[in-house]
Amino acid sequence: MSGKIISGIQQIGIGVSDVQAAFKWYRQNFGMSVPVFEEAAEAALMLPYTGGEPRSRHAILAINMQGGGGFEIWQYTSRKPEAPKFQPLLGDLGINIAKMKSKDVAATYELFNRRGLNVLGELQNDPYGKPTFFVKDPWDNIFQIVTSNSWFQQRKTDLPGGPNGAIIGVTDIEKAKTLYSEILGYDTIIYDEEGVFDDLVAIPGGDKKVRRVLLRHSKPREGAFSPLLGASEIELVVAINRKPKKIFENRFWGDLGYIHLCYDINGMEALKSECEAKGFPFTVDSANSFDMGEAAGHFTYVEDPDGALIEFVETHKVPIMKKIGWYLNLQKRDPKKPLPRFMLKAMGLSEVKD
């Protein structure tokens, strides 16, 4: 384990058909109001997942200053993004649902209902006894609102914080745990149950029998952005009595839906060795550095045993205050040490207020 540091979920990638409309909806309803970068360019390195050709796209990485990961809101501009040919069901293979953290799930539920959002079903308790509910965005992505006590800034709002996990459909829990528990550090089982669950019935496939395993990490995350990214969880779901489909079968990365789950890391070489030794070789590697104009670093991808894409980003440069050209070079500091809170808070100065 020495040599690699996982600071938390940096972002979840969401393929949409209108990046600006999605950014507006996500900032108004989920508080994802701080753009870290915005770029229109070619995705030249994702060829294994884009039909062997570079594809043009427009992407915005947005974060929530209450804490949690970000959204990489991603829209093809060189082709029309495709939806799945079928209705994905809970337990289908890949990232099913993003988890969004809330200080008060019941208050968020009331707010979303007052706003007329597409809330799925009633407020229910999960197997751990915590209140939860689901909401669908205008692009058919489903989000679960979950309780969390891991916050960067406590704001007076009933809006959720950023994403703090995902529900991922797999075929074999033990195989999946090699990646999620051993490599990514989700080493604590909160529950492992099989059946039909009241808190899932309102989502497609949620009325069918599944096995669900909620995993959290026992050790606090370290690294530059760990105070902002906070604690996270992964819920692995296996469909019982049916053969699950791959959500991205015959589609490209970047098409509609959850395209990847991304972790902020340090120590890419150590991570590469560990991933290879455990059967998860890098399928994409940007080599020394990518440059997104306003942010730079080294990114790689692995596939989980069922093909869900997990991205790793080692950040080299990040904008703290774009207006005055304040960029931070992260390569010259202790990788375990969190950034000072004032620096992380300064990222919020580029917040978009509607």
Image (spheres, rainbow, N blue to C red):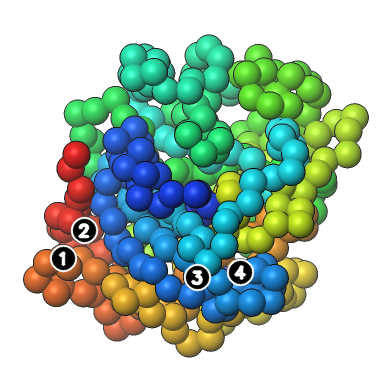
Work out whether mark 4 precedes mark 3 in sequence or the reverse, and give the earlier one. 3
Question: Which residue is disc 4 drawn over?
Answer: 301
- CA distance separating discs 2 and 3: 27 Å
- CA distance separating discs 4 and 3: 19 Å
Verify CB contact (< 8 Å) between mark 1 and mark 4.
no
Q: Secondary structure at mark 2?
A: helix
User: Is residue 8 among the parts visible in the rendering?
Assistant: no
Q: Secondary structure at mark 1?
A: strand
Mark 2 vs mark 3: give the one in front. Answer: 3
Give the residue at x 43% y 73%. 41
Verify CB contact (< 8 Å) between mark 1 and mark 2.
yes
Residue type, label 1: Met
Q: Residue furthest left?
A: 324
Mark 3 vs mark 1: give the one in front. Answer: 3
Give the residue at x 42% y 23%. 117
Question: Which residue is disc 1 drawn over?
Answer: 321
Q: Is residue 268 above or below residue 72?
A: below
- CA distance separating discs 3 and 1: 28 Å
Question: Which residue is disc 3 drawn over?
Answer: 56
